[in-house]
Image (spheres, rainbow, N blue to C red):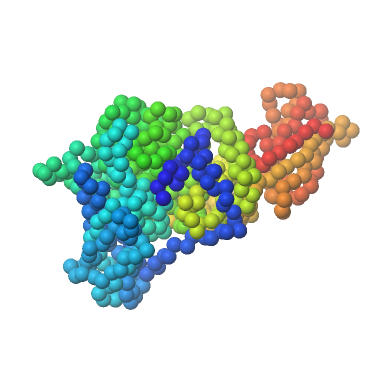
Amino acid sequence: MMTIMTSCRTNGVGWSRCLLLLQCLCLSLIVSNAVADTYPRQPGIDALNYIFRLTLSDDTDEIEGEATIDLRFIRNDLADLTLDLASASGGKGMRVSEVLSGGASLRFTHESDRLRIVLNSPAKAGERRQFVVRYRGIPASGLRILKNKFGERCFFSENWPNNARQWLPMIDHPYDKAMSEFVITAPAKYQVVANGLLQEETDLGDGRRLTRWKHSVPIASWLNAVGVAQFAVHHAGPVKGVELQTWVYHQERDAGIAYFETTSRQAMEFFSDYVGPYSYEKLANVEAAGFGGGTEHASAIFYGENSIITRPGTGLIAHEIAHQWFGDAVTEKDWDDVWLSEGFATYFTLLFTEHYQGRDAFVEGLKRSRDSIFTMEKKNPGLAVIHNNLADMKLVLNQLIYQKGSWTLHMLRSLVGNDKFQAGIRDYYRRYRDINASTDDFRQVMEENSGRELSWFFEQWLKRAGSPVIEGGWRYNPATKRIEIELTQMQPGDPYRLPLEVGIKIDNTAAIKIEKIEITQRQQRFEIALDKEPSSVALDPNTLALMEARFINR
Ligand SMILES: [Zn+2]
């Protein structure tokens, strides 16, 4: 459904209002009901390209569509195939008038949001065919037709996570990425923005304009986007060779350009340098109506009209631009792995903060994030980052996926070291750019780049519910000249394997001596040789471990 909570895709370094709403709605989510991603995949076909021709009007909310779907068959002798498309119900949804292939009409059935197309001859593996679907209807969601905050009519898509089917016949799941083209006919007072490059604008002479955008890089269904409104459009020139554009309501032209462009330039530069080349043909930041937060559509990011311009935007913009690399270019193979999108965008926003604002701001963000994880885990004791309840797609996201996913990357960076972490990230992006990856794919790349076995790490932080609770203390033994540390893991279940730093201050100076230990047992004792009694000893002084700790001088 297309309410604030599911379309609010970001929280940046702080919390967005809608993410908190999302958190509240996830309280009943428990692992005992866990159902993995159940989407009915079609291994016999591969969608290559979609062309969506749509006519929009000011007189009616009904849209008229013609979709051309270009498919390759992977198996022999398929007799039919199925596309997702909302069926007509209660005056909304789509009615299909005909399906064609090679100029011939095909038989089809359209019920329960599935359009089953019967082939007129069995397909051979490797064969490519095009199918044309003609349809019309009022979208129940997916394409919002509404008035913006200035009372002007507008049209904005919101496909996350599986609402593309509400107005576009397609394989509506991230696993089958395809190129796409939008050919929009609309009243000429509107500008139209979509994914990819602008190919055509033609005034039709009847008060309407045809606009064609073509996206030449394969993307997941939810990342397709169309925005139609009375925009001010600013072409901000290239950044790292990519055209940067701002699309804001004409009433907010100056403030909107100022809001987006500096941060976007910084984010494009930082993520390109850190991760690898940007994957798409342009980047448009688009002000949009009908939802809060932002949605990371490939090359055309939408930001809710009430979440931007009058509010600080650095974290939100950096989060959505980070998604162009993670979520968009590298897409999770199924919904169980959505942390590969949201956890990455959240941590890369923190890395952006570290790069431009310094270590203190970065650590502040980590601490806020850590607190929110503990709050969320106490309210949802069975919840883990992976293997959540996907029977209800409204619950595909929760705060743990963002924050604990992000913290998992932070601890991985600390475990393998900065250089190997970055090398692994770059390798992962290079290998999986414009296709799909699983958590196991990411783990394998990081193992190869770090030379470490990491399955324990991924299991512990992504599939286990809860976080370590550490209690303990220290004292200095002047006879042996040693600091004696005792630690107990208080959380239920097996002990965690937890590499930890101990920070030792001598003489109350600012300098901290760091010693590394690793807790693997429920109760453990460590001794650190030191000639002189320290003034203080702290666990995890550099904010590298996800744990609740009580640690005192005994
Ligand atoms: Zn996000």
Residue 217 appearing in the image: no
Could you tell whether 383 is left or right of 69 in the image?
right
503 relative to 163, above or below: above
**Where is residue 268, by image quadrant?**
top left
Total count of labels: 0
Which residue does the image show at 79% across and 47% down from the upper left?
523
**Where is residue 376, by image quadrant?**
top right
Residue 295 appearing in the image: yes
In the rendered image, residue 97, in percent from the top left (x then y), is placed at: 23, 63
Which residue does the image show at 22% across and 67% down from the upper left?
101
In the rendered image, residue 231, in percent from the top left (x then y), is placed at: 26, 35
Which residue does the image show at 27% across and 55% down from the upper left?
137
Which residue does the image show at 34% across and 51% down from the upper left?
140
Could you tell whether 290 is left or right of 424 in the image?
left
Question: For this rendering, which residue is in front, 57 or 253?
Answer: 57
297 relative to 246, above or below: below
In the rendered image, residue 23, in percent from the top left (x then y), is placed at: 54, 43
